[in-house]
Amino acid sequence: MANKMTKKPVPQKGILEIAPYIGGRAHAHGVAKVFKLSANETPLGPSPLAREAFIGAADQLEFYPEGSASELREAVGERYGLNPDNIVCGSGSDELLHLLAQAYLGEGDEAIATEHGFLVYPIVTRAAGAKIVQVKEKGLRADVDAILAAVTPKTKIVFLANPNNPTGSYLPVDEVKRLHAGLRSDILFVIDAAYSEYVGKNDYESGIELVATSQNVVMTRTFSKIHGLAALRLGWMYAPAHIIDVINRIRGPFNVSIPALRAGIASIRDIDHFEKARAHNAEWLEWLAVEISKLGLDVAPSVANFLLVRFPSEPGRTAKDADEFLMKRGLILRQVAAYGLPDYLRLSVGIEEANRAVVAALAEFLGRKP
């Protein structure tokens, strides 16, 4: 009897090696007015049409959603010129990444990601019983040659965040194609394009073209960023038919709620709000980069809706010191030591008041004039 009492269920190998994902903080103790700039959320909020659609779904809460999310898939397909049959919707793009790992990784397999890539990639890989291989970046940017050199016969998935979180860097389309060309055809190439809507570079492509012309490429997208629907957990994936078939076999039959579906459809069709969000980000991303650089801090070039700022290593001037200083003033940034970047803080673009407040507070922290 005593022996039975000491035994307990044991999780699968690799699960206890996973460091739980911790989201950006939302509160500053003892501070009345707070600007949350830690989670890359859009400062403009969701489309007013999406809000209306969400509220309008309140009279349907007793019903199961349509399982295939057909109306949302059609709306996404219409917006981007895609076949809805090649789209799967999920509870955020995180769920889709989990499903891809579950379907294509197992014990003895390997997945590749870059050293400062999104923390969900190691989580989904280890959860599937596989090994994550994190390769060095070059100048805070994915290194195609390093990724290709890390490929082994055990490699089954390569994850590429493009643009990357938290660095804000991106790979031009020619480099993405070169990476894909160097992979075996049985390796799944996952392009995580969560921040693609913010990119204004002529040499960038979200991955749609490569998916359409290949059999081993998947692109994931989210409604959490520029669409402002993070609370609803909504994402989508564009992939070849055979991969769509696999994911539809293992995803939950009602994995996207009716309120999320309705809000997503309204949001994807509200082009005016989308363009306002893009314009706001373009203006203030550049302004923040310039003003923070004037203070003597290194700001990594970014094409997303956030900046990565490097702080000195001297006591009293470190990223940790700056974070504590800013928190006391109600300015919540993101520490990124978990990404292997202990000398940096990540700053999301906020409303004008928040952006100006951050620069002023950083100037005060450094003893300089803004």
Image (cartoon, rainbow, N blue to C red):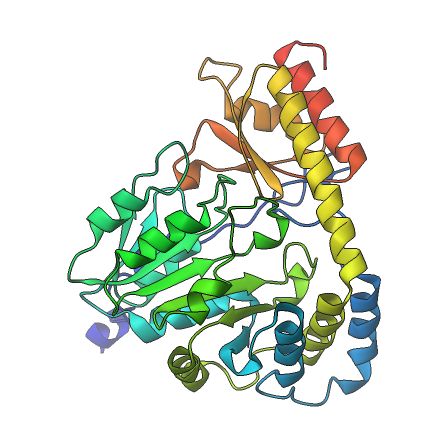
Q: Nearer the viewer, residue 318 or 262?
A: 262
| Residue for point 75% across, 34% down | 354
Q: Is residue 18 visible?
A: no
Image x and y of residue 326, in percent: 65, 27
| Residue for point 27% across, 69% down | 12
Q: Residue 102, located in which quarter of the rendered image?
A: bottom left
Total number of numbered labels?
A: 0
Image x and y of residue 276, in percent: 78, 50
| Residue for point 58% across, 35% down | 307
Image x and y of residue 68, in percent: 57, 86
Left or right: where does residue 160 sit relative to residue 197? left
Q: Nearer the viewer, residue 225 or 174?
A: 174
Above or below, comparing residue 109 to residue 134 in the picture: below
Left or right: where does residue 275 sit relative to residue 160? right
| Residue for point 40% across, 42% down | 116
Above or below, comparing residue 60 to residue 55 in the picture: below
Image x and y of residue 345, in percent: 54, 32
